[in-house]
Image (cartoon, grey):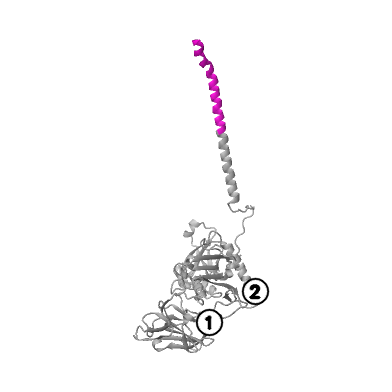
Amino acid sequence: MDRRETQAPEELQPQEEAALLAQQAHRRRARFRFTLAVFAGLATIGWLAGQLLLPDMPTPVLSAKPAPSEPALAARWASLMPMQRTHESDSLVAGDSLAALLARAGIDDVEADAALDALRAVFDPRKLKVGQKVRIFSEWPNNIPADKRAEDNTKRFAGFDFIPEPRQRLVVRRTGHLDFDAVKQERPLSERFFFTDTLISSSVYEAARGGGMSPNLVVELIRLFSFSIDFQRDMRDGDQLEVLFPRRFDENNQLAEEGDIVFAALTNRGKRYAYWRLANDDGTHGYFDDAGRSVQRLLMKTPVDGARLSSRFGMRRHPILGYTRLHRGLDFAAPRGTPIYAAGDGQIVALGRNGDFGKYIRIRHRNGYETAYAHMNGYARRLKKGVRVKQGQVIGYVGSTGLATGPHLHYEVLRHKKPVNPRDLEVPAQTSLTGAGLDKLRMAQTAIGTRINALATDDNRLHSLPRRSATAARQ
């Protein structure tokens, strides 16, 4: 009995070993199938992500032929010998000229004069402004390696180019010994629209700049609303600003030009002022409200940008004379030299020194209105008595001539020779649309509303403000 008990484990040992081996093999197969399933799942997820999330990529089309070279700007340049080229850039500084810039780059005077003579046939270099960027080119034969060109004497001045205006490039190229040719190249620009929708917390200027608008466009925006809103008195934190504007980019996706405001709305104290841009038949444009009334009024309320109201209309104690008398206008404190604009279309009836007012201009407008501007530092060029001026035209600059404690503009409005408070002006719109003009405005509103809705995605809308439909935006 004891003998059988001691032999049983020895007889079962091979069976246990076989079972253990089979179990290990089963586990290995299970791990392999699991790993294979994981890799297959990851591959499937990657493929789905590529199909659903990544942009479609065009299928490359291969060709045995080499890609065509960039065409010559001028057909007559096509026969020129191919050359290797490089360039350096420089910009005009104050008191600079294009000739001085070329001399600074080490260009020989004779070669520079020949290149400038070619340019003058199509463009006056005296029109170039400070900051203008110029690319100066050098060239050498194709058969000289780049590492040997410094040792070779064949490198020479090849010409220059610059962009005098966003849609044009001027190219001056060497065509022979002291021979240069100049051409104008049109620059194709692509237009994209941008929409800013923001709350005003400090000022319209800061809100607009924070929304991506350029300083020049912000000035245009402020001028647009200056006929209806007193920025010194009316603005409140929480007012809303909406602006649609285009920008134009060159072939390198670099900003080339800012466009005009297409639509602007300012909600001030719960009242919404909205204006749409409309092209006129004569090539000009204007801005109109939903009723077809021009945003432009006979007179501007504030004929100077960025000024602070320092003295109001009415009786006051004169800061220099010391006694109380009627202050017949508004004083706007601003840095010396700040441009002053004509408040409306009209004719200059007085220009020169006028006693306590110092340097002074008075303009006669329609409907018995006149405006006066005093304490000016100086006048704009070519202005004299009898000259007609346009609304928004610069007529002078802020100063402190006459009886003044500091640089400011004294601005008066007179109706039939009697002074009125510029803040209380309720002058009519310059024009009002009817018939076909209103139909044209409705079409423009629909197109602009569609574009705004397309741009106002979840990524750029203000979630604290309800979005407006294209129809509601006109109300």
- Residue 411 falls in image quadrant: bottom left
Q: Is residue 8 rendered magenta in the image? A: yes
- Overall secondary structure of the magenta stretch? helix
**Residue type, numbered disc 1:** Val
Question: Is tag 1's residue or tag 2's residue first in the polypeptide sequence?
Answer: 1
Residue at the right extreme, as displayed: 436
Residue displayed at 52% across by 19% down: 13
- Which element carries disc 2, helix, strand or loop? helix
User: Where does residue 355 sit, x and y in percent of width and height?
Assistant: 39, 89
236 lies left or right of 166: left
- Which one is nearer the viewer's eye here, 45 or 81? 45
Residue displayed at 53% across by 24% down: 20
Closer to viewer: mark 1 or mark 2: 1
> Total of numbered circles in the picture?
2
Residue density around tag 2, few if under 14, some if 14–19, many if 20 or more, within 10 Å: few
- Residue 279 falls in image quadrant: bottom right
**Residue type, numbered disc 2:** Asp
- Which one is nearer the viewer's eye here, 381 or 226? 226
- Which element carries disc 1, helix, strand or loop? loop
User: Where does residue 421 sit, x and y in percent of width and height?
Assistant: 46, 83
Q: Image height check: is 212 above or below 290? A: above
Specify the segment rendered in magenta: 1-30
Q: Could one spot residue 438 in this view of the protein?
A: yes
Q: Which residue is mark 1?
A: 427
Q: Is residue 90 rendered magenta in the image? A: no
Q: Which residue is mark 2?
A: 439
User: Where does residue 294 sit, x and y in percent of width and height?
Assistant: 57, 77
- Residue 233 falls in image quadrant: bottom left
Where, quadrant-wise, is the C terminus in this rendering?
Answer: bottom right
User: Where does residue 260 sit, x and y in percent of width and height?
Assistant: 55, 71
Cα separation, mark 1 vs mark 2, equals 25 Å
Q: Image height check: is 132 above or below 376? A: above
